[in-house]
Amino acid sequence: MSAFAALGKQRDVQEYCYPHPVAKLLAGPVERSNFTFTIDNSVFALSSIFIGLLPSEYFVVKGLYQLKVHRGICLLNNVHEIPRGTGFPVVTSSAESLPTLSAPEKDHTLLEEQLSDNKTLLFPQCSTVIELSNWKIGLQDLCRYSPLLENLYYSKDTQYTFEFVLGPEESTSAIFFDQHSLRTLNGVCRQMETVVVFGVPNGGKKTFAKAMINNMVLAGRKPVAYLDLDPGSIDSDAPGCLSLRVVRKAILGEFFFWTQEQNKENLHRYYGFTSFADRPHYYTRLCHELLAHYKQHLEHKGIPLVVKYPCWIKGYGKELLMQFSRALNPKKMVYLTHNNAVSLEDFEIDAFEETDHPDYEVLAGFQHRDCSIVRGVRRDRGLTKNELLFRNKLLYFHQAPGPRF
């Protein structure tokens, strides 16, 4: 019996995520891998590393690499099953939490059946086999243009363009979803139409939006429109613009659109400021133009829409978002709350959050048909927003075909 066929025989233990997520990754944020290299589970080639994972093993990697699953099931961030045989480029940086790659938990009977099929294969005792390959596109050389970006991308002078986070001296923050977050994610994606992700600064809005997109692209095998309304977004490959883009390939690392194929369905509108306060009416007009483009060219194709609101949870900025939400009329809103949030690396809250601001008070006035509240996972970026926006400008002016920089 094949490994995939055997998986179909296991009990339906968890409704919200299949196959079984790793319990330790559900319990709380991890800072390093629980995987240890041995001669029985790893092969180091000239430009790649082959790894065999046992059930519940996971690792955290920093750097740039191409990921390919050769056997078994590999979960990204304890959520997404990575298709076998396809290479996925992954970009990570010190500005964001790192992804986790794991082998799902299984019952003992299933494991024995699967391993009996592996006896003549590489790492026969392992349920999952993964290959990480070097990926050189020039990002590591960005520090030549600015010392401020020296530690942004992995740039050690080693054989590989990536490094495993193993010991306590290398500890970092990894992406974390608890059980409630996974249930919310699964529920949103079952009948996904127009979904808004909203919440406090550095609360995980982008991570949750990306998880929804990857869920649809990987599991649903359908494209997703992504509308980023944050004028100070650090992810855009069109600096200074508000952007609507159609995502057709999963993005396993950070939002790095420079390597995504450009298509005519994408639309960018230049704003030129990082705050609504500079030109609020012009900002609102651009938001409506992007929404009109979606409704005219994409909605009738059955392409769902994920909208990431800026973190304007008070004042005039909130009023602008409330006005736009009436035109958008989303089916679902996911709110990343500061109440009971998970704080990583000594994250410091602001004065607004130190006082009592219930979630219903923040959400009052927004147009939506259903709202789920998920606790945020918060960490400082390590670099300021201005430094990351400067990074985007460097990438824009130094990009070359390939893509390379």
Image (tube, grey):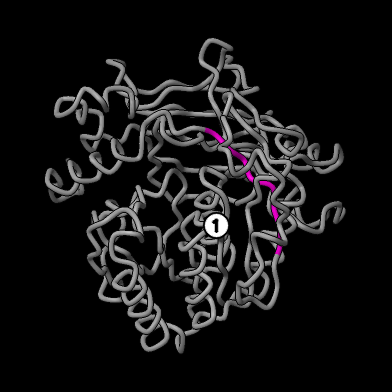
The number of discs equals 1
Q: Nearer the viewer, residue 5 or 388?
A: 388
Query: Mark 1: few, some, or many residues within 10 Å (few <14, many ≥20)?
Result: few
Q: Nearer the viewer, residue 228 or 322?
A: 322
| Residue 349 part of the magenta-drawn span | no
Question: Horizontal and vertical percent for residue 15?
Answer: 81, 58
Q: Quadrant of residue 390?
A: top left
Q: Nearer the viewer, residue 239 or 29?
A: 239
Question: Label 1: which residue?
Answer: 314
Q: Quadrant of residue 95?
A: top left
317 shown above or below 152:
below
**263 left or right of 132?**
left
The residue positioned farthest toward the top in the image shown: 169
What residue lies at 66% left-to-right and 50% top-to-bottom? Answer: 337
Q: Which residues are magenta?
A: 372-379
Question: Horizontal and vertical percent for residue 262?
Answer: 26, 65
190 shown above or below 145:
below
What residue lies at 26% left-to-right and 68% top-to-bottom? Answer: 268
**145 left or right of 119?**
left
Task: Please state which amino acid type lies under the numbered disc 1.
Answer: Lys
Q: Quadrant of the C terminus?
A: top left
Question: Horizontal and vertical percent for residue 307?
Answer: 49, 67
